[in-house]
Image (cartoon, grey):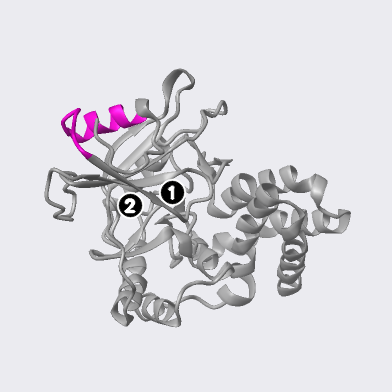
Amino acid sequence: MGSPRANPVPEAILREVVAALGWPFDAQIEVERLGGGCIHPAVALHHTDRPNTDRPGDPSARAFLKWDDSPRQDGAGFSHEARGLRMLSERVGPVIPEVLGVSDGPEGSPGWLLLEFLAPRLPSYEDHVGLGRALARLHRPLEPDARPGLDSTEGWIATLPQDNRPRSSWGTFWREARLAPQIRRAAPLLSAEGIEALDTVADRAPGVLDPVVETTGGEGLSLLHGDLWSGNVLYSTRGPALVDPAVYRGHREVDLAMMELFGGFSAEVSAAYEEHTPLRPGYRELRRPLYQLYPLLVHVNLFGTGYVARTESTARRVLAALG
């Protein structure tokens, strides 16, 4: 199997991927290391014997591959991410790369995810506006009987388990499936006052969130990307694209709050979104910080005490807004 450049892909994975793509076993393959990911190594694969067409959904010449650099024993795999990408692709919204192959690495071997390669480009004003409009289309309400979560499965947010089991209401889901597990996990790093504030916020979440989502005239649930920070948006030659989702059904403002937590999105994105789908009163002063507590707690649990002060101050900010 040819490899003109130094190849970081394990040989066993490369053989499986080549078979999934339908490339000849002895194909000349150029491997380009890609940066940006903090969990899995990633490369672009180029079958140099074929023209690089970059046609949507055409794996004939190029593909994107990421894999586990060491097998995990916690049951985490790529099939959940692949399912999320396929669910997003069924909605009218941003570009979603086609899933070309996936393996969860049976019997302790490394797993991998193979996607359509999306060629990047520098974004234009039209791309920023297009992203905002596309997200608004993605977030259009689901059917009225949709339940928060995702069937009976559990998922992942980065390397942490994410409980996606449905609950009786959206506010109950946010309390039980999002805030409470992360508060428990982060408790050894938090102050006693911080835990008390976070627990109080979690207890009051249903009363804040259910009226906005589930009452008559409420917004209903949408399909969420679930981890929508700037690193998971790709401006491609096909248009703005979303990658690395943690998909579930929930309130659209969850994605918006995540986008605003660490920045990286232009004002044009927000303006285009709100022109298409205006935000209801109470988002910025109350629901945005309430939704931002979840990714902040995730960051505490992934990266440690550096995020504790902001997490606890955000909890106090929610309590002040609640009065």
> Few, some or many C-alpha atoms within 10 Å of disc 2 (few <14, some 14-19, many ≥20)?
many
Identify the image quadrant of the N terminus.
top left
Identify the image quadrant of the C terminus.
bottom right
> Which residue is most to the right?
192
Q: What is the x, y in percent for residue 282?
A: 58, 75
User: Considering depth in this image, is 82 or 90 the residue closer to the camera?
Assistant: 82
Q: Amino acid at mark 1?
A: Val
Question: Which residue is the site of mark 1?
Answer: 247
Residue 19 counted in the magenta span: yes
**What residue is drawn where x is 59% and y is 62%?**
291
Mark 1: secondary structure: loop
Query: Is residue 282 shown to the viewer in this render?
Result: no
Q: What is the x, y in percent for residue 51?
A: 12, 51
The region drawn magenta spans 13-28
Question: Which residue is the site of mark 2?
Answer: 88
User: Considering depth in this image, is 158 or 12 the residue closer to the camera?
Assistant: 12
Q: Amino acid at mark 2?
A: Leu
